[in-house]
Image: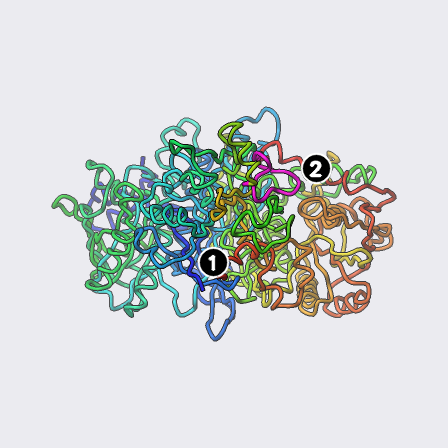
Amino acid sequence: MPKTAIIVFPGSNSEEETLRAVQAAGGKGRLVWWFEGPDALKGFDAFILPGGFAHEDRIRAGAVAARDPIMIAVLDAARSGAPVLGICNGAQVLVEAGLVPGTDKIGKPQAALAPNVQGHYVDRYAEIELAAPPERCLFTRHLEPGTRIPTWSSHGEGRFCFRDDHTRRRILDEHLVVFTYVGGAHNGAEFDCAALTNPPGNVLAIMPHPERAGWRYQQLERVRFEARGDREAFLAPCGGSRLFALFAQVFA
Amino acid sequence: MLALSTSELDRISELIGREPSRVELYAFDAGWSEHCSYKSSRVHLRRLPTEGATVLLGVGEDAGILDLGEVDGVRYGVVVAHESHNHPSQVVPYEGAATGIGGIVRDVLCMGGTLIGLLDPLRFGRGDLEGHAHQRYVAQSVVDGIGGYGNAIGVPNLGGDVYWDESFDDNCLVNVVALGLVRADEVVHSRVPASADGWNLILVGKATDASGFGGAAFSSLTLDEEQAEANKGAVQVPDPFLKSVLMRATYRTLRGLRELNVRDPGFKDLGAGGVLGCSAELVAAGGMGADIDLDAVHVSVGDLAAEVIATGETQERMLWAVPAGAPTELLLRIYNEQFGLPHVSRGARASVIGRVRADRRYTMRHRGEVVVDVPVDALTSGIRYEREIAEAPNRESSDPVLHGDAAVLLLRVLAHRDVCSREPLIRRYDRVVRGTTVIPAGHGDAGVIAPIPGSALGVAVSVDGNPRYGKLNARVAGELAVCESARNVAAVGGEPIGLTDCLNFGDPTKSPQMGELVEAIEGIGDAARALGLPYVSGNVSLYNESAGGSSVAPSPIIACIGRVADVSHTAGFAFKSPNSVIVLLGPRSGALGGSVIAEVCGADGGMLPRASFGALRGELDVVRAGFADLTIYGAHDVSDGGLLACVAEMCMGADGCNGVGARLEPAAAWAPGVPELAAWFGEAGGFVVEVPPEDAETFIARARTAGAQAVRIGQTLAEPRLIAGGSDVALSELASAWLTPLEDLYA
C-alpha cells in the first residue's frame, strides 16, 4: 500500500477532508506540515497539495508556495514519476511551479490561472467530464472514456490560460486537458479546462474540488434523496471519490 | 476621545479612592462601555430563558455550548456565538465585516472548539436602488469582506439572510453567528481556575499596533458623519492568513495541553478593551487578580502609548493562562517555533506578559512605572443603568384591501429584493470547505452539516429576523423571529435545541427606542419559553441610528440551532417528485402588515401575523416525526412573500432548474374567509410539506392530533408549471424573475 503525503502550507484550509478522501478510497496517508521540511517527505509514494490560500496567495495564487522549501522534494518526486495531485490552490501551486503543463526550454511556465471572468470568488457545484483518453493520466486510468464526476468549484482564480498558440497546440495534441466543465467553464477557462496534466501524465492540477463531492451526503439534493434514510449509503464515498482511487493502488 | 460621562468619571474616582491615571481612564472607558458592560440592557436580558436540558454551558463565557449528543460514547457540544460589527462595517465595510468574522472565530476557538460554520445576517440600506451609490458600496464591500475572511480561514458559510431598508442607509447591520464543535470533556473556559495563583498569562497572536484603539467606546456611540474619518482608526485590521495559522496552532496546543494533563487552562479572546479588558475578565471570572507587564507585550512599533498597548483592539490576539514550566514551554514552542508566527505576520508571536495573583488586585506596569493599580472587580463589574423606558410605538393599523392578478403579483413578489434568490450573494462564500456540508446555504431553510467524520449526527442552523416587522411592532417581530428560526430548522429535518440572539436597536437614552428594546426582549423571551428553547449566548448592539437621529428598524435577530440525529433524514426545500400531495400547516390570516405583497401593491399599514405557540409546537413535532419515519419528502417554511412564493421556490429549487410543477386548489377551498391575495401572499407562519400520496392522510391526521392546522392544498406535477389562482405560469418564467435581481450587485 502506497503512502500519501498531504502537504499543508501556511494558509492551506482543505487538508483534513483531503486526507479523509484518501482514506475513504482505501489509501493511507498523513498530513505533512510545511515546518517539517522537505526531508519529512522521504518515504512517501504520492503527494497531494490541498486547497486553501497557501502563503496568503501573495503575489499570485500559488506563487510563493511554489517556492516553499518543501516543494523541492515534491518537484523531485514529480520528475521521477510519482503521482502528484494539486486541488484548487494546490493546482495553482503546481502551475506556478511549472509542473503542469511543463516549462519551455528556459524554464518558463506555459500556463497560468487567471482571475475568473466574474472578477471574484465563485462557489458552486460543477460537474466535470473526462476529456482525454483515460490512460493519458495516472489518476484516470481506471475510468471509462467520458466519465462524468461531480465536484464543487470554489475559487477566485481558476481560469486556465495558456502562454501562446504553440502551447495551445501542444496541449491539444498531447491531450493534456484531462477534465472539462460540463456545459462550459463558468470561470472562462480556455478549452473549458477543469484539470490539466503534464506530458508524462503523473501530475494533475484540478481546480474544482472532488473531495467536496466525494461522499453521498455531499451530492446534490436528487442524488442524496436516492439514499434517504439509509445511513450507511448516505455516508459512503461516491462521485468525486473516484479521483482518489489511485492512492489505494500499487503504482506501476 | 473618551465616551465616559462626567458622572461616570466621578464614580470611578469614588471607587478607587483617587483620581484615575490616564491608562485607568481608558481602561474604564472600555470596561464600562455599552459594548462591554451591557449597562442599558443587562437588567432586561435577565428575563430571557437560559436553562434547559440541552445546555452544556450557559451564557457568561466567550460562547455558550449546546448538547449535540453522543457518538461512540463521547458527548459532543456545539459552541454558539453571535456578534455584531455594525458600526465598523458602516465606516470601513470590507475591514469591518472581515474583523467581525475574525472576532467571533476567536470566541469559539477559546472555548476549545473547532470551527465548523458561520452565518451572516445582513441589513443594508437601499443599495439595490439607483442613486444610492454609498449604500451599494457598503452592501458589496461587506459581502467581499465576509468572503475574504471566511473563505481564507476555511470555515463554511451555513446561511444567513439579507434585507434592504432605508432605515439602514446610514447604519448597516452586520451580524455574524459562529458554530464550533467540542467534546464535552474538553471544554476550555474563559476564566482561570482556583489553582491559578502564579500561572503565566500568555498573549498569542498579532503584534499590538495602534489600530482598533477606542473600539469598544466607538461602537457604543451613534455614528457621526463629521467624525467618520477619525472613527476609521477605531476599526481593526483583519489578517485571515495569520488567523488560519493561529487556528491550526491552537488546535495543536489544545491537544498538547491535554496530553500534559493541564486541567482547566484559561483561554480568552481579546476583543473589546484589548489586553486589559481580556486579562481582567479572565482572572476576575476565576476570583483572581493579575500583574501585567506592558513592556512584555509584543508590539509592531516602538513608541506606542501605554493606554494603546493596554486597551487597543488589534485583531488576531488571544490570551492563555497556563502553569509555568512545561505547559508554558509547550505553548511558546508550538506558536513561535513550530507554526512560526513571527514568519507568518511581522512581529506576531506568543509572549508571557504577566502572572495571575490570588488577591483580586489588578496592576499594569509600563517602563518601570505602575500605570494601573485597582481592584479587578472595579474594572469588570461595570455599571448598570435603569434607563427611562417609554412605551414602544405600535405602528400596526387595519389591514389594507389589495387588488390584482395573483400570477402577475407572484412575478413581482419573487423579484422583490427581500424574496429573490440569494444565490448570487451566497456564491461569494465558501459553503463546502471542511467537506462536512450536507445541505448548503440556499438549498434548504437551514444549513445542515455532519461535523463528525464517519458519524451521521448533524447540526442544522438558521438565522432570522424581519426588519419590516420590527418597524411595526418590536415585540411581535421578536416573537416571529424565534418562530421562524425554529421552523427553518425543523423544515430540513432538525430538532431545535437552543437559540442565540443579537439585538440591534437605536439609542437607549431615548426612551421610546429603549422601550422597543425592552419589548423585543419580552417577545423573544416569551416565544423561547413557549417552545422550550434556551438562549446560550447573545449580543446587544445599540446606538444604531440614521444621520437624522431616528433608529434603524428594531432588529431582534435570532439563530436557532438544531440537532439532527441522522443526516440521511434531512432534505432541502425543492420538490422531490411529481404526484406528491402538498400539505399546508398553519392557518392563513388577513394580516398584511410588513408583508412583501403589501409593499408590492403600494399599500400602507396592516397588522402583523400573530404566532400561536401551541399550534407551532404541534407543527414542529409533526414535521420532525415525518422526517424521522420518512413519511414526508421535504418542507419549506412560509415567510417572506407568503405561501405562493414558498410553493414557487419548491418548484424551482435552489438553482431554479428543479422542474417539478404544482397545481394548487383555489384559495377559498383551504383558506375560507381569508381575502384571496392575503391567502396566497400573506406571511402568517407555517410550513408547506411535500408528502407521498400514500402517506398524506396519515400525515394530516397526525398533524391535527398534534394541535396543528393541516390542509391539503394541491399536488406536484411532472410538467414544469405552477397552476394556481386561476393562472398557469411556466417555471422558467418564475425562475427568471426570482434568480436575477441580486446579480446586479453580486454576480
Q: Secondary structure at mark 2?
A: loop
Residue appearing at x 78%, y 58% in the figure: B583
Q: Secondary structure at mark 1?
A: loop
Q: Which residue is mark 1?
A: A251
Q: Is residue A27 left or right of residue B609?
A: left
Residue projecting furthest to the top: B131
Q: Residues within 10 Å of mark 2 (few under 14, many from 20)?
A: many
Q: Amino acid at mark 2?
A: Ala
Q: Which residues are magenta?
A: A176-193
Q: Amino acid at mark 1?
A: Phe
Q: Position of residue A124 (x, y in %)?
A: 59, 45
Q: Nearer the viewer, residue B524 or B366?
A: B366
Q: Quadrant of the C terminus of chain B?
A: top right
Q: Which residue is mark 2?
A: B415
Q: Is residue B100 left or right of residue B197?
A: right
- In this view, B88 is above or below B432: above
- In this view, B263 is above or below B419: below
Q: Nearer the viewer, residue B549 or B253?
A: B253
Which is more foreground, mark 2 or mark 1? 1
Q: Nearer the viewer, residue A18 or A203?
A: A203
Q: Quadrant of the N terminus of chain B?
A: top left
Chain at numbered mark 1: A
